[in-house]
């Protein structure tokens, strides 16, 4: 029974539903008592099990601030002489093409979202590896400063359910998505892989991939 529910949950996620919502509609089925940081394949995603915005080098700038500094098109200013928090800069959101100067308008997006990483194999990682993933600065396409609204519209969706509004960035987005998944040995499910391959074929022909036709129900 639980195996059948797990398969159904995977399908419903791609359609825009949450497994938690499904369980809430089935009061006769007890919710399994799972440790979200246990690493078992059945563990539910818990954002707290993926520590993010660490200060790995101890310079008082956490990962979010490091990304804002690195991606600003002009030298940033800080709130204080300690240079811990960015006050102003200029960032071009690759998802929308819009430009921003106030960091409060931006989210730092995990290009492959934490929940997607969890579903794709990260559920088996220990906490230290999850923290490395959540704060990885080695590759500039892993964490991206983007318009907050665009990031929240994306949520934890894969390319088969969400692609950037900015047409000129879609091929680069697909390449970056592939790169993150390959570097971290994360899986691509059949629906995701089929969409990515078809979109990549469009890129190879010099075309702009169309936005996904399927969108989650509202």
Image: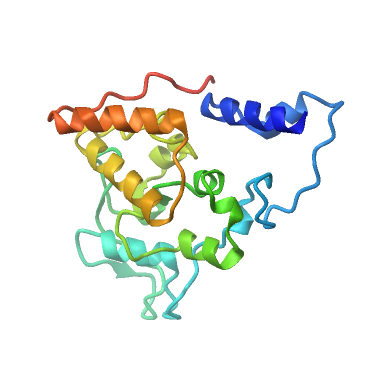
Kindly tell me whether residue 106 is visible in this rendering: no
Question: Which residue is pictured at 39% across the width and 65% down the height?
Answer: 65
Task: Left or right? Give the position of 57 relative to 114.
Answer: left
Residue 28 appears in view: yes
Is residue 122 depicted above or below 5 in this figure?
below
Residue 128 lies in quadrant: bottom right
Residue lying farthest to the right in this orientation: 28
Taking the view exactly as shown, the residue that stands out farthest to the left is 206
Relative horizontal placement of residue 203, taking residue 8 as reference (left or right): left
Residue appearing at x 20%, y 58% in the figure: 73
Q: Position of residue 36 (x, y in %)?
A: 69, 52
Q: Position of residue 67 (x, y in %)?
A: 35, 62
For the point 41% across and 80% down, the residue is 59
Q: For this rendering, which residue is in front, 21 or 93? A: 21
Which residue is at the front of the view, 196 or 56?
A: 196
Q: Position of residue 136 (x, y in %)?
A: 41, 63
Q: Residue at x 76, y 23 (%)?
A: 25
Quadrant containing the N terminus in the rendered view: top right
Q: Position of residue 95 (x, y in %)?
A: 30, 40
User: In the picture, which quadrant includes the C terminus?
Assistant: top right
User: What is the quadrant of residue 89 in the picture?
Assistant: bottom left
């Amino acid at each position: 029974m639980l195996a059948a529910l797990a398969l159904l949950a995977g399908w419903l996620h791609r359609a825009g539903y949450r497994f938690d919502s499904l369980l809430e509609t089935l009061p006769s089925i007890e919710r399994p008592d799972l440790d979200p940081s246990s690493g078992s394949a059945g563990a539910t995603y818990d954002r707290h099990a993926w520590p993010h915005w660490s200060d790995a080098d101890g310079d008082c700038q956490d990962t979010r601030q490091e990304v804002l500094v690195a991606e600003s098109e002009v030298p940033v200013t800080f709130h204080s002489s300690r240079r811990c928090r960015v006050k102003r800069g200029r960032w071009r959101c690759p998802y929308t093409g819009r430009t921003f100067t106030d960091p409060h308008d931006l989210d730092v997006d995990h290009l492959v979202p934490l929940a997607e990483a969890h579903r794709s194999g990260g559920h088996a990682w220990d906490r230290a590896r999850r923290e490395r993933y959540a704060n990885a600065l080695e590759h500039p396409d892993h964490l991206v400063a983007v318009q907050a609204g665009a990031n929240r519209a994306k949520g934890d969706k894969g390319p088969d359910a969400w692609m950037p509004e900015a047409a000129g960035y879609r091929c680069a987005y697909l390449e970056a998505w592939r790169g993150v998944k390959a570097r971290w040995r994360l899986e691509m499910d059949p629906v995701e892989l089929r969409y990515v391959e078809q979109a990549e074929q469009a890129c190879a022909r010099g075309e702009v991939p169309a936005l996904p036709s399927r969108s989650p129900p509202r």
